[in-house]
Image: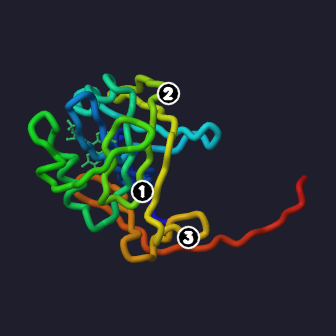
């Protein structure tokens, strides 16, 4: 192993930030918005729960607090520049749907827009809000999940398919796109 260097404590997340970047969609009354998230995680299978970390200064925070619902939209690399821009401007100043030309359809289980140009969409109802440092962690119960048929194989995403590449944030304007699938070997061991 090569020599290790110290990095600032606040950069810790750049070592473990590997989930796909997602576009959160929100609606409250007439107001709706799209925001980019790197800090998201699955939390439970039964009930199905996931979490997104949202800073209170975001316009989306205002909407989710009013409506208690949100949708997670999984983009592929073809719309990376839109994903990046959605994470650098506020819905207070722009209609991101119009500006970024992102079409939406209606979610079925919650009152919220779903982005049609994304490969997967997850409809969520807020179950719990936890204040963590400079963010609020919104835990959502999954009410419905859909995925593009052509990239879903053997019950997982096939990232090697055209349009199957999710984007993962490394920091600042840098992203990575996984396009390899490796199979781990099964092994059996005697318990002590
Ligand atoms: C790649 C990327 C990832 C981001 N991840 C998060 C995140 O996990 N949580 C968060 O609150 N903001 C995150 N942001 C910042 C928001 O997307 C950004 O502040 C956005 O402009 C807020 O928009 P809004 O005011 O319309 O809600 C991220 C931005 C980028 C570019």
Q: Secondary structure at mark 2?
A: strand
Q: Earlier in the sequence, mark 2 or mark 3?
A: 2
Which is nearer the eye, 95 or 164? 95
The residue indicated by pointer 2 is 127
Give the CA separation, mark 2 to mark 3.
Answer: 30 Å
Q: Secondary structure at mark 1?
A: strand
Which is nearer the eye, 103 or 135? 103
Give the CA separation, mark 1 to mark 2.
Answer: 21 Å
Crowd class of label 3 (few under 14; some 14 to 19; many from 20; radius 10 Å): few
Q: Earlier in the sequence, mark 1 or mark 2?
A: 1
Q: Are marks 2 and 3 in contact (CB under 8 Å)?
A: no
Give the CA separation, mark 1 to mark 3.
Answer: 14 Å
Which is nearer the eye, 147 or 77? 147
Q: Earlier in the sequence, mark 1 or mark 3?
A: 1
Q: Is residue 8 above or below residue 100?
A: above
Q: Which mark is residue 153?
A: 3
Q: Is 57 on the left-hand or right-hand side of 47?
A: left
Which is nearer the eye, 39 or 34? 34
The residue indicated by pointer 1 is 120
């Amino acid at each position: 192993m090569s020599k290790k260097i110290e990095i600032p404590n606040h950069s810790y997340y750049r070592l473990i930030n590997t989930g796909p970047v997602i576009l959160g969609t929100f609606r409250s009354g007439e107001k709706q918005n799209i925001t980019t998230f790197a800090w998201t995680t699955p939390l439970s299978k039964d009930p199905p729960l996931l979490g997104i970390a949202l800073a209170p200064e975001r316009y989306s925070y205002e909407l989710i607090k009013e409506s208690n619902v949100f949708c997670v939209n999984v983009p592929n690399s073809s719309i990376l520049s839109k994903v990046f821009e959605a994470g650098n401007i506020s819905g207070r100043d722009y209609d991101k749907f119009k500006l970024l030309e992102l079409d939406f359809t209606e979610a079925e289980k919650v009152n919220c827009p779903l982005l049609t140009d994304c490969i997967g969409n997850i409809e969520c109802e807020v179950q719990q809000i936890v204040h963590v440092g400079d963010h609020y962690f919104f835990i959502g119960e999954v009410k419905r999940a859909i995925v593009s048929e052509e990239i879903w194989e053997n019950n997982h995403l096939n990232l090697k398919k055209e349009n199957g590449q999710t984007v993962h944030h490394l920091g600042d304007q840098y992203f990575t796109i996984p396009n390899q699938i490796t199979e781990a070997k099964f092994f059996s061991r005697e318990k002590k």
